[in-house]
Amino acid sequence: LIDVIDEVLMPSVSLFEMNYAISDEIWHLLSHFPYTLRYRIYAHWKGVMTQRHSLINVQRGKTLGMTRYVVKRLSKETVRMMGRQLGKLCHSHPTVVFDCLLNQIQTFENLIEPVVESIRFLSDLEFDVLSFCIIEHLASPDKQQLKASDGSLSPWLQSLATFVGTVFLKYNMELTGILQYVANQLRNGKSQLLEFKIWKGD
């Protein structure tokens, strides 16, 4: 069953444009597996399966272009309209949409609130993929979590921490993955992730 989900069902999601029902049905299967296995499937879907199949890669490019178009128009005033568009895009290529959104909020802090409000239209599967993408961004080896000058949190991590705390408090998302990531970081002597709003209860 796992192989069928990994090799057939997940790639097929990217070819069915904006289909909430398919996303929902796949979640009914995936929700029975531990987050470690789900995240492995998402990583395979995002990387190997997209590169292996040209049609999926083409769809990925279209989704990225449309996501950038929507994000440019996202504001407090347009959050409902643009949120519906983002939700539809997530039904086919959620990792593409989330990578774009997470990159934006790490650069533009004023986008955090509109993005949090706009993702209310996601399916359970897409919220789970969002958790996976958040951990990917937190664990990126290409970014310094602390400023070299004074050892304080880097601006990108401050923004991401604010987003993570806000989104996990607002929506019913599984915490297991992010909690395990933070626990692993603490074991490695990295206590800066305790700045996350979700731990403070802000």
Image (cartoon, grey):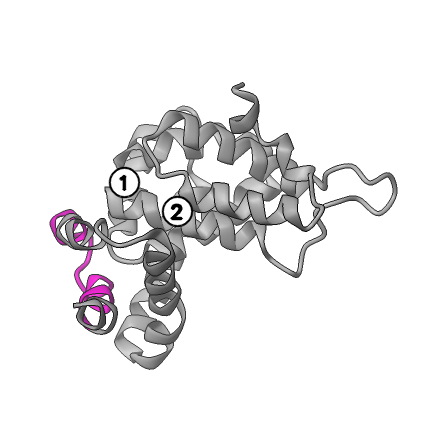
Residue 65 seen in this snapshot? no
Residue 19 is covered by the magenta coloring: yes
Q: Where are the magenta residues, as a range?
A: 8-23
Where is residue 157 shown, x and y percent of the image?
Answer: 64, 41
Residue 16 is covered by the magenta coloring: yes
Where is residue 29 shown, x and y percent of the image?
Answer: 16, 54
Residue farthest along the right direction in this orientation: 149
The reply to whether callout 2 and callout 1 are in contact (CB within 8 Å) is yes
Residue type of the residue flagged with mark 2 = Leu
Residue 104 seen in this snapshot? yes
The N terminus sits in image quarter: bottom left
**Most frequent secondary structure within the magenta stretch:** helix
Q: Which residue is mark 1?
A: 122
Label 2 Cα neighbours within 10 Å, binned few <14 / some 14-19 / many ≥20: many
23 and 17: which is toward the camera: 23
Name the residue at 51% across, 28% down. 198
Q: Which residue is mark 2?
A: 130
Position of residue 179 relative to residue 166, above or below, is: below
| Res. 202 image quadrant | top right
| Res. 92 image quadrant | bottom left
Name the residue at 64% across, 31% down. 195
Label 1: state its secondary structure. Answer: loop
Disc on the earlier residue, 2 or 1: 1
Name the residue at 43% across, 43% down. 71
In the image: residue 14, left or right of residue 64: left
Residue type of the residue flagged with mark 1 = Leu
